[in-house]
Image: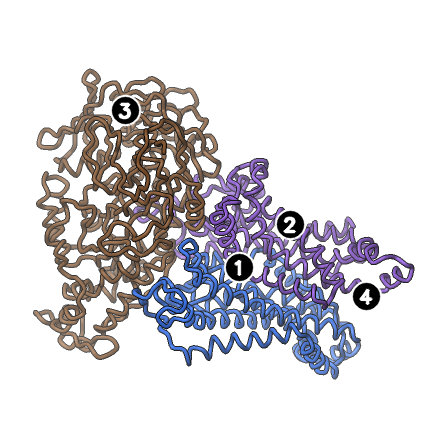
Amino acid sequence: MISVTSSRVPDTEETAASWRMGALFAENVLAMVGVVLLAAVVLFCFVGPMFYHTDQIHTNFPQADLAPGAAGHLLGTDQSGYDVLGRLMVGGQTSLIIGVCAAILAAVVGSIVGAFAGFVGGALDTVLMRLVDGFIAIPQLLVVIVLATIVVPTRLTLILVIASLSWFTTARLVRGEALAIRNLEYIEAARMVGSPWIRTISRHVIPNAVGVIVVSAAFQVADAILLLASLDFLGLGIPPPAASWGGMLSTGLQYVYSGYWWMIVFPGAMILLTVMTFSFIGDGLRDALESRLRER
Amino acid sequence: MTIFLIRRCLHGLVVLLIVTAFVFSLLHALPGGPARAILGPKANPTEIAAFERANNLNKPLLEQYFLWLGRALHGNLGQSYNQNQSVASLIAQRLPKTLMLTVLALAVSLIVGLPVGMLQAVRRNGATDRVLSVTALAAYSAPIFLTGILGIWLFAVRWRVLPAQAPQGTSALQILADPKALVLPVLCLGLGSMAAFSRYMRSSTSENLVQDYVRLARAKGAGQARILYRHVARNALGPVATQVGLFLPILFAGTVITEAVFNYPGMGLLFWTAAGARDYPTELGVVLVVGVATVVGSLLADIAYGVLDPRIRQFGRES
Amino acid sequence: MTGPLSVITGPRARGRRRAGLGACAIVVATVTALAGCSNSGTSSVANGPAVSGGTVTMALPAGAPFNYIFPFESPQYVTGPNVTDLQMLMYRPLYWWDGSPYQLNLAKSLAAKPVFEDNNTTVVLTLKKNWKFSDGEQLSPANIALFLGLLLSERTNFWFYLPGAFPDTLASVSYDNSQDSVTLHLKTSVNPTWFMENQLTMITPFPTAWDLSGPGKKSDCESENPSVQAKDCPAVYKYLTAQAADTASYATNPLWQVVDGPFHLTQFQSGGWSVTLEPNPHYSGSPKPRIAKLVMDVATSDASEYSLLQSGSLTIGYVPFNSAPVKPAGSTAPPSNPVPGYDLQPVTAGWSYNDMFWNYNNPQLGPLLHQLYFRQAMQSLVDQQSDIETALRGYGYADYGPNPPLPANMYETAYEKSAPYSFSLQRARQYLTSNGWKIPASGRATCIRPGTSAGDCGSGIATGEQMPALTLNYATGSEAWTLEVSNLQSAASRVGIDITPVATTSGNLAAYFAPCTASQSECKWQMIYLGTPETDFLTFYPETGIVFREGAVFNVSNYLNPTIQSLFSQVYTQPGNTALDTIDNYLTKTAALLWMPVPDTSLYEVNPKLKGFTPSPILVLEPENWYFVKL
C-alpha cells in the first residue's frame, strides 16, 4: 500500500519521534484542511441532529420527492419522504462509526500480529505472512459478498466483517518495522536479559511503528467508507429505514432519469468529501512520517 | 533470479491453497445448504437427498475439500448448480472478458497515472501538484457506481455519444471492435487506480529526485528531461511495479460493480449471481481463478521490479 | 395459489416478476389473432401501414439467463426465460392459454378441447390435423406417446410433477391413429376444469426425431406399448438431457431445430444472456410471425436495463418500479411516461395472491396461532392500502383471500371481495381483549383469562403468560418489503404484539421452506415473508389444496384443518366450483394465512413502431402477433 523506509529509533527518542511527526503534520496545509473538514463532518453528523430534528424512521409519503427548498426541506426529500439533510446526518453516523471502528480494530489486530511475526521471526513469521499474503490475494469484496449472504447486516457485523479483511496490510507494515528494530543492540540486549517478548513488543516495536499504523488506519477508514457504499449498492448494507450515505446514493441513482438530482448530489458529495478528508489526513501523516525519517 | 522465481512460485502455491481452503470452508459453513436454495421450495426430501448425494454434500468438510481440489487440478471445477454449464466453461467464457476490461483499465491508469505522478513530483508542493493531488483524490473517492451511472446518463442518454452498455460480443475481437462501448467501463474501473498510481509514482519519484545519482547527473550537465526519463523513471517505477500486483484484487473487486452497471457478463457478475444463488462450485471456481490471476500478476510485477532494479535481483526483496 | 411451478430462489426471486402480454382483455381468439389487442399505451403517433420484417430487441428482467432448452427439465431450470420465453415459442404445448386472466386459445392449441367421458375418468384428446413439425413430420399420437413415455419413467425428474398428481393418477393410455386421438384412462374421476387447467397443461408433444438413445440411434420410447416404453425411455431421457447440458450447441444442434412453434433458435450467446430467434418457415399455425428477428436479452441488473431503455437501444423494455413515478390508487398507469418517445403499457397484474406464511407447528407461536381470534387480529393489523401507497409506490392491489384479486375473475368470492378483516386497530384490539388478553399502554399483552371456554385465551396458554415475541424473517432485496414488515410491526406494537423483523437472504429463507413437526429443529421459524409471490404459469386453476391440504408439498405452514380436508378431494374429483368456493370462504373467514397486497408484475415500454405487444398476467409471450409499422 505504501512504501516506507524503516525507522530505527532507540527507546527514549521514540516518543519524541511521534511528537516530531505530529509537528510536521501540522505544517502540512492540506492535512490541516483535512482535519478541519473532518471535524466539520463529525459535528454535522453527531451534533447536527440535536439541533435539526427530523424523523428518519417513519416514511412520509405525501412529502416524497420534493426539490430542495420546498416545504422547509433545505435539501429536499427522498422517495420515501425522508428529509435529505437530516438523513445525511444520521447516515453519516453509520458510515463514520463503521469506518472508524473497523479501521481501529484492523489496526489493533494487524499491529499485534505483525509485531509478533516480525519480532519473533522464524516459523511463526513464515506461517503468518503466508496467511496474510493469502488473504491479500482475495478481493475483499468477494469475501464480503459471501459473508453478507450468511450474516444479517448490522453495524456490528459490518464492522467485524470489514475489519477482518483489512488488518493484513497493517500486519505487513508493522512486521516490517519489527524486523527493522529486531537487530538493534538495545533490543538484543533486552532479549538476552530475558525480557519477555510482550514487554519488548509493546514498549518498543509498537511505539516505533505508530507512524506507519496511523497512516494505514487513516486510509483504511477511507476504504471502509467506500466499501460500505459498494455494499449498499449491491443491496448488502444495513437495510432501511436505517440511513447510510451509500444507500441514499444508490437509491438516488435509480432516479437519475427522473431529474431528482438532490438525491444524488448531496449523498455523493458527502461520501466524496469524507473519503477525501481521510485521504488528506493519511497523506499528511505519511508525508510527515517520511520527512521525519529523512531528517535523521 | 531463478531461485527468486522458484521461491515466489512456491509461495504463490501456498497462498492459493490457503485462499481456496478458506473460501471453501466459508461457503460450506452456510446454514441450510444449497440443495433447497437451488431446487426451490417445491423440492421434496428425496430430491434434496439425491442432490446432496450427487454433489458430495454429506461428506465431511475436509474430504469435500480434497475431492474438490483433486478435481480442480485436473481442470474439473464441477458443474454450476443453476447455470447448466460446467464451471470451467463458464469461467472460460467470462474470464477473457474481465481480463480484457481489467488489463485495459490497468493500462489506462498506468499510462495516465505514471506521467502525472512524475509531473507532480517535479512540481512538488507547487500549484500544479496541489490541484492534481486533489483531483486524483476526488477520482479515487468516487464510488464506481456513481461515476458509472452518471457517465451513462451524461454520455449515453443525454448526449447520446456513447453506448449505454459495455460491448456485448463474446470474443476478444468482437469486444475490441466496439471501442466506443469500452470507454466508459474502462474509465470507471481504472479511475481509482489511476489516482493511486499517480500517488505512488509521485512519492517514488520524489524519493529518487533527492538521491545522489541525480545530483551527480545534474553536475555532469544533464538536462532535467534526460535525468527524468533515463534515470529517475526507471528507478521510480520499481516500487510502483510491486503495487500493481497488489492492485489486481482491488481492480477485480471493482469489476463486480462495473459489470453490473454496464451489463457486461464477466467474472465479477458471475460471482455476484453465483453468491446470490448459493452456487458454491462457481463461487469456488472464481475465487481459485482470481487467486491464480493475482498470484501470477504479483509474480510478473515482482519480476518487473527485479528487471528495473538490479539491487533486488541480487539481494532479493524483503518479502 | 402458489403453484407447483417454483422459480429457483436467488437473484430471480429478488422481487423480479416476469411479464408477458396484455392486461387489456383479449377477445377469445377464434381464427386470427392478427391485431392482438391494440395497445392502450400513450401512443403519440397514428398507426402507419404494417411492414414485414424488422428486429425486436426485448429486455427480460434481471435474473438467471437462458440455460435450458429441452422442455422436460428438473426444478432448478424452470425459469421464465427458459420456459415461456424460449421453449414455448419453439415447442408448442398441447394447449395454448393466453388472455386475461387466462383463456384457452383453441386456434393456437394442437388439439380440440378435451372431452371428458365415463364419469370424468376418461379424457379424449383429438389432435389437430395437418400440424407439422419443421422436419416435415405430421403431428400424431406418437408425439404424445413420446412425451408420456418420458413422463412415466422419469416423472421425479420433471418439475411439474407432484406426488399423487398426474401421471400417478393415470391408469392407462390408449392411442387411436386413425382418429388421431389419445385417450387417457384415469384411476379416479377428476374435476374437468382442474384437470384441463392444471394437469393437461404439462403436455408438450415431442417430435419423434427426439426418440434417440444415442447419436443416430433410433429408440422406441414413442411406442404405444407401456412395457416397451419402460424399457426405452430412460435411455432416451439420458441422451436428451446430456444434449441439453451442452448450452454452447443449442443453436447448432439439429435436435433442437426440430420445432413446431412459430420461432426457432438461431443464436445462443454463450452464457445465455442473449438469444436470437427467427421465424420458423414451416410453422403450421397462424398468425405467422411478421418480424424478422427477436433478440431477447436478460438484463444483468435493473440499472443497466433502464439505462438501455433510456438510451433508446431497446424495442421493448421495462421500467423498474423503483425508478418509476408513484402511481395513484386505482389507475393503471403512472401520471407521466418516464421514458418519452416510448409507448407506456398499462401496468400488468400477475395471476397470483400474496401472503405471509406462519408456522402452526412452532412451539411458541403454535398454541396462539391455533386460536381464531389471534389470526383475525393479525389480519386486521395489515394496512394494505397504506402498504400499497407507501411500500409499493402505488404499484399493487389489495388481497384478502386465497384467490388472485386481479385480473377480475370468477374465483374470487364475494366474501373475499368484502375484505372481512380490513385494517382496523380498534377491531384488532377488540379481538384480543374479548378473548382474555390485557393490552398495556406499551409492551406485550398478557393473558388474564386462561382456559378453553368462550372469551378465554385458549388451550396451551397459561395465566399471566405474555404474548410470545415473534420473529418475522423477510426477504432482502427490496425496500418495499422492509417497509411492509415495519408497517406491520408498528401496528402490532400498538396492541401488545411484539414482532421483530429480520432481513434474511432468499437462500436462507428457502432453507426454512419445508413442512416440519414441532420437535424438529427446522420448525423454529415463526413467520416468513417472501415479498413477492411467484406468478404461476401453466397452472391456472386456483385450487388452493397445494398449499392448504394436509401433507401437500407446499403446505409449509403446516396448516391442518379437518373441516375442509375432505372438501379438497372434491375439488380434484368433482366438476364445478362449489367445494372450492366453500374452501376459499372458509380460508378467508378463518384468516388461514396473513394475506398481503399483491405487487404489480411489470411496467412495459414499447417502441411506438411496434404493434401487437400486450403484457400477460400468465406470462405468455406471443411475438407472432407483433409487427412493425411505418411511421
Residue bearing the label numbered 2:
B108
Please provide percent x and percent y for residue B232: 80, 57
Corner quadrant of residue C519: bottom left
Report the chain shown in blue: A
Residue bearing the label numbered 3:
C285
Callout 2 and callout 1 share a chain: yes
Lower sequence index among marks 1 and 4: 1
Q: Nearer the viewer, residue C121 or B309?
A: B309
Residue bearing the label numbered 1:
B143
**In whole angstroms, how far apart are the C-alphas of marks 2 and 3?**
55 Å
Disc 4 marks which amino acid?
Val
Q: Is residue B253 above or below residue C209?
A: below
Report the chain shown in purple: B
Q: Is residue B264 visible?
A: no
Q: Which chain does tag 2 point to?
A: B
Disc 2 marks which amino acid?
Val
Report the chain shown in brown: C
Residue depicted at 16% across the width and 74% down the height: C437
Label 3 residue SS? loop
Please provide percent x and percent y for residue C64: 41, 44
